Amino acid sequence: RHTAVVTKLKDTRSLLGPVEQTNGLMVQDSGLGTSGVNDDIDDSLHDESDRRQLSSTTYTSTFESDFDSWTTSTFLRNSGSTSSSSTGPSSAYDGSYYVYAETSSNNYPGFEFSMYRDFGDDVASVSFQYHMYGDTMGAVLLQGSDDGGSTYTTLWSKSGNQGNAWYGADVSIGSGYPQWLKFVYTSGSSHTGDFALDQIEVVAVSYTHLRA
């Protein structure tokens, strides 16, 4: 299932909250479960005199029927457990399906799995569920690009065995908004390093430019 919900916001300031930023980025790892998406848009970056009628679109990817517009040649969709024991989830975070990196069949060490998506508008926040269980887990990056995928900046990262559970991550972007997002997972030293993703929610914003 892939859904997009569009809302109209009268004032950019309505999205601001008491958020601390470092280098324009606030990252919150919420532990088990996800409390919601944190929107954080810096008024100083958007001149109200020529940017008005801000719209916000939420894209939700649950992978129930396909990859929900994410492009990949390495991640797999799956229902139930992965093919290796002592690694990967036993079921989806929600629903029946999730996507994951299968690290058996010589997909280690240091094999790179990736999936990306172009959202067209500026991405303001991302939330997702991830599963990193196994003795030889590698490292995952969430990256963003504002130049059509030519270069990427790391927005969030995690590495190592996190235990046999789904965890939620919330990433709010305060400046340099990307239009493209990419997940990159690099496998560890053996086959017990299956990494999984589910329930990805992306908030993208667009502006009406009233003057050149």
Image (cartoon, grey):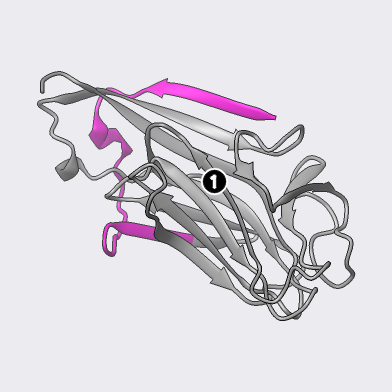
Residue that appears at 78% across and 49% down: 92
Residue that appears at 52% across and 40% down: 117
Horizontal arrangement in the rendering, residue 47 relative to residue 107 (left or right): left
| Residue nearest the observer in this picture, 18 or 101 | 101
Magenta stretch in the rendered image? 1-28
Where residue 76 sits: x, y (%)?
A: 75, 49
Magenta segment: does it hold 196? Answer: no
Horizontal arrangement in the rendering, residue 134 relative to residue 90 (left or right): left
Quadrant of the rendered image containing residue 207? top left
- Reply above or below: 102 against 128: below
- Reply above or below: 89 against 7: below
Determine the secondary structure under disc 1.
strand
Q: In which quarter of the image is the N terminus?
A: top right
Residue to which mark 1 is pinned = 116
Horizontal arrangement in the rendering, residue 104 relative to residue 2 (left or right): right
Which kind of residue does numbered mark 1 sit on?
A: Tyr
Residue that appears at 29% across and 43% down: 41
Residue 33 visible in the picture:
no
Quadrant of the rendered image containing residue 189? bottom right
Where residue 147 sits: x, y (%)?
A: 33, 44
Magenta segment: does it hold 4? Answer: yes
